[in-house]
Image: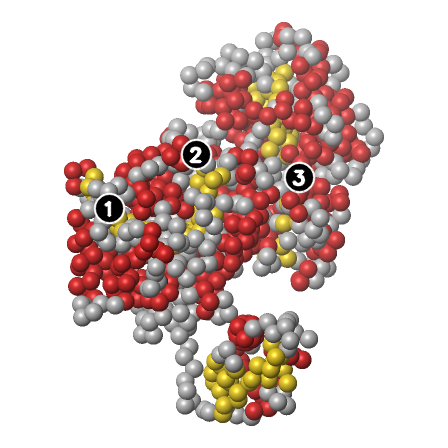
Amino acid sequence: MKNKLLTWIDVEREIKKFNLSHPELKEYIVKVDCYSDAVEVQYRGDVANVKLWIGNIFGDNYNKERDFISVGPNDAEYEVLLIEGEDSVANVDTLYPLWKEHAYNSKSTAYPTPWSGGAKVVAFHSFKGGVGRTTSLMTYVSAVVNENENTKILLIDADLEAPGISFWLNNELSPTVSFLKFIEALHYRFGASEQEVIKYFGDELFKKSIVIDGGKKEVFTLPSALDITNIMDMPVTPEHISKNLENPWILSDYIKKLADYLEVDVAFVDLRAGLSELSSPLIFDPRIEHFFVTTIAPQSILGMKEILSKVYASHSNLKDELPFNTKPSIVLSLLTDNLKKLKDYSNANEILNSAYPGSENDVVSPGVEWLEFEHNESLMSIGSIKDALDKLKQASLYSSAKEWAVSIRSDSAIGKISNASDTQSKLSDAAKLHETCKKFQFAEDIESNDLLITDPLRNLAKHYYNELPVVVSIGAKGAGKTFTYIQLCLSEDWDSFVRVITPKNASQVNAKIYPLLSSLNINQKVMGKLTTIRDDIAKSYFFDGEIKLSSAFLSVRSALEKDTDWESFWIKLILSQFGKEELSLQQFNDFLVENDKSIVFVIDGIEDIIDDPVKDDNHRNALKALLYLPNVLTELTNRRIGLVSFVRADYVQAVIKQNHSQYVSRFQQFRLEWTPETFLRLAYWICGKAGIIDANIEHAETKNLDSLLSELEKLWGKKLGRDTSKEAHSARWVFAALCDLNGKLQARDLVRFLKFSAELMSRASSINIKPELWVDRVLAPEAIRRSLEACSKEKVDEAIAEIRSLREWAEILSEVRPESKKVPFNPIDVGLTLVLISSLRELGIVYEDTDHNLVEERYYLPEIYRWGLNFSSAQGGRPRVQALLKRNLGGMPF
């Protein structure tokens, strides 16, 4: 039994819904028309197929013997008239840009003729009123007027039920025409041509335009109606205009022609809120740029979801050759810092991302452009258009509006064909970048000046410029621990290191830097340099023996195989480097005092030796004693021994359970981690080392954020598309693609990513990348997007070899069915134990969505691991990942 059909309208709705999911029935159903007393079904072929079709829709409500459908509270007989006929009455496939049409049709069947040049048409819409739609629109108007010279704007109040902008016009500036009069005059022209109507309205608007800066700038305003009574009596509405059989998009064309007659740069249209046919003709037009304004309130979000999903369905089969940039913008308005912390904030992002999804091959970029508008009480008192143009410059949305305003007048080089010489120069730069990244990815063949000075290094030099350091430098895998270790050791003495970092602060400490333990990943050339440094120091400290770096490594390995007093072991290891095993640590320190010597021991690669601090007590005790060795050293009288240990963050977490936060905070200022700012500095520094984009490595530490972003546009462009597009900003996209879902990034991944992007550019011609179209940058958007998969696979292969917990999980995953390896996932389905989850979560490999802690499939992988671990992205997973990135990267400065 189907749902109760109360009227013949319900019959029509059920037929439309069924046809939406069964388009194949077009083969024998020619046309269906519902009337108040009967439904006419014109068909071809066997009538039995038609009766089966009706029965599938209405079930027991359909009497196939007598051909009626039971309708109404008393099950009245609604007649079904079956009319056989091939094509005598054609079924019109035109899909009008109206909600009632799109409610049951998933895709448009015809698209409007593209506009060529002239004014840009932009529409602002919201599901609910009172969410800041008009204020958002006027912020963009303000930006266009204030940021461009000699500009003209057409402002149309198309809210025919609750006008907004119209009330900002005083009597002196109020035109003698309105939007309602405009569509009426075009609908009933009474002998006048379309051009004459357009000219009349344009001339009337010209008489009452708002002139700014002595006539350099001009705003034309078309109010919704001249008085409220016109709204109460509307014989012609946008819906009537859009039922034009020859051109359903004629209303947009009218607006465009008026805008072009006035020679404006942009026509802004403020649409009626909600699912109103007063707005739908402009909402479904792909030639118009759309801004949808919503708060994070569930009602507003769910309404906006329905709007976006219908617009997406309409736009999803646009032919590639049509020059439409349909990507809409979402303005989250009335936001506060507290609202951003709520689940509703990330849920809003997820819901709307799913309603208008982006490319399946790009999980990082959402299908919509996200903008945010902070709540500002001072903007609630705007009373005129001129007032809005001035006050809205202080709105948080203004920075985005300013960028958009500048882009519409931009003469960007993107899209222009470069000559062969310029193209070859860009490809040559890509080759230089590729070679440089290969060099720096694994800290091989580096020189003593190959160091980007970041805050942790600067803090180390400043804090210990007049005393010996006793520091545990904590950092995630790939944070640059080995790289920094090598640079520190190659400085050879503490004073030289401090002078490199802070040239103005000469060190008051004369101490040699001694490599005590090193990573196994260091190549032979660097290892040779470190060995020479060790030998020279030992000889200067009156020791003629030879203790190799590998010997220290083997000593630790041997001690791990038996019960060991680890505090004593680490002390004895230090003493053994100079043949002083018989002394106590204090006695060795006194020996250094007597000979006026000081030494800083440096340790790295502890993860290569101690590989199981989670499960093995002896490994755990070894690491714990090393982490607390600074306490022992600080107790020395007249201390001449320093220590800098580089240790991975997850190792510290595994060993120090109690007072972990207190321990980490003790060395927090020396922690190796990469912020969005240092990410930009590293990218610029690498370009400087490669000798491209005119980057100067000396400026990598001093340039401000805006300058870095501007300079790096020469590397990867402003956006992953044209500057005027709504594609993601390149710098933000790269950071989001490489970081984990907590927003943590590893330096090595950026180097690796640039390596693969540059390598793809070298094969551009064979992989359908056209560098000649991107003359403003070294790396084309296609190369940037495509490099993520290779980057992830190489990273995971490397991480599996280095991280025990990931190696264990990878072995388990080899037995897991491919269909279970999707994001998000249930840990049980992919063989994750609680111990593995804890370790992988600490490493940033696995992310638990605690907002959905009652859902089993709440675990995610960042993109930099997902590809390499062969996980697919479930359809519902992409919007959530985008929402998590947006929330967790919310504080990014770009």
The quadrant the C terminus occupies is top left
Real-space Cα separation, disc 2 to disc 1, in angstroms: 28 Å
> Looking at numbered disc 2 in the image, what kind of residue is underneath it?
Asn
Q: Report the disc number at residue 174.
A: 1
Which residue is found at the position 64% from the left and 77% from the top? 75
Percent x, y of residue 555: 73, 31
Q: Nearer the viewer, residue 620 or 45?
A: 45
> Looking at numbered disc 3 in the image, what kind of residue is underneath it?
Glu
Which residue is found at the position 18% from the left and 70% from the top? 191
Q: Nearer the viewer, mark 3 or mark 1?
A: 1
Sooner in the amino-acid sequence: mark 2 or mark 1: 1
Q: Is residue 430 visible?
A: no
Sooner in the amino-acid sequence: mark 2 or mark 3: 2
What residue is disc 3 on?
842
Number of other residues with Cα within 10 Å of mark 2, as a class: few under 14, some 14 to 19, many 20 or more:
few
Name of the residue lying farthest toward the right: 563
